[in-house]
Image (spheres, grey):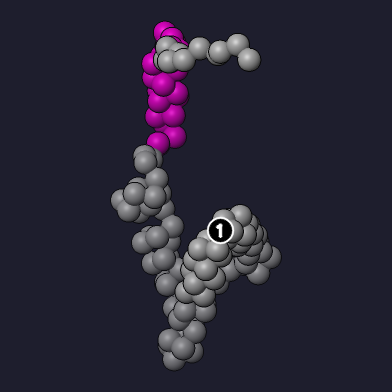
């Protein structure tokens, strides 16, 4: 909310580079943060389950089994390419056994492709 407010004021004053720089920096920080959380702090599906279901795990008879069950549920529901394709995050899921066929088909389509540029509308006048 604050970012949108500040960026809209900056854009209104004619400064469009600073908001774009902020977007780029925040994207890089987000990517680095994800890598650090997953690789260094082991906050994958198991870490997320431990954080999200800490109270329920303490109250259960076997906390380790409860966390393992929630981790498996997360992996089943979210950590697969079919869910990403279902929501449109990716275009297609290529099975490993179909990879060679898909590459051959794509290259066959490009085999006879000719690149045609549109005709020039204006010439270069002598200066």
Observer able to see residue 100: yes
Residue 72, above or below 85: below
Q: Which secondary structure class fits the magenta region best? A: helix
User: Residue drawn at (43%, 86%), measured in percent from left and top?
Assistant: 56
User: Residue drawn at (36%, 39%), measured in percent from left and top?
Assistant: 92
Residue 102, above or below 90: above
Pinpoint residue 54: horizontal percent, then vertical percent: 49, 84
Badge count: 1
Q: Nearer the viewer, residue 49 or 30?
A: 30
Q: With 39 as the anchor, is 2 left or right in this view?
A: left
User: Residue drawn at (58%, 68%), measured in percent from left and top?
Assistant: 43
Residue that lies at the very extreme toward the right in this rendered image: 40
Residue 41, above or below 21: below
Identify the residue position indicated by label 1 in the image: 14
Q: Which residues are magenta?
A: 94-116
Q: Nearer the viewer, residue 76 or 109?
A: 109
Q: Nearer the viewer, residue 118 or 115?
A: 118
Residue that lies at the very extreme toward the front in this rendered image: 127
């Amino acid at each position: 909310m604050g970012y949108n407010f500040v960026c809209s004021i900056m854009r209104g004053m004619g400064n469009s580079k600073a908001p774009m720089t902020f977007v780029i920096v925040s994207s890089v920080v987000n990517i680095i943060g994800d890598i650090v959380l997953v690789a260094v702090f082991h906050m994958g599906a198991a870490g997320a389950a431990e954080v999200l279901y800490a109270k329920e795990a303490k109250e259960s008879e076997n906390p380790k089994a409860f966390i393992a069950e929630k981790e498996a549920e997360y992996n089943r529901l979210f950590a697969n390419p079919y869910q990403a394709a279902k929501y449109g995050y990716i275009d297609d899921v290529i099975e490993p056994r179909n990879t060679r066929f898909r590459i051959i088909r794509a290259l066959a389509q490009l085999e006879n492709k000719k690149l045609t540029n549109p005709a020039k509308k204006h010439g270069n006048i002598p200066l």
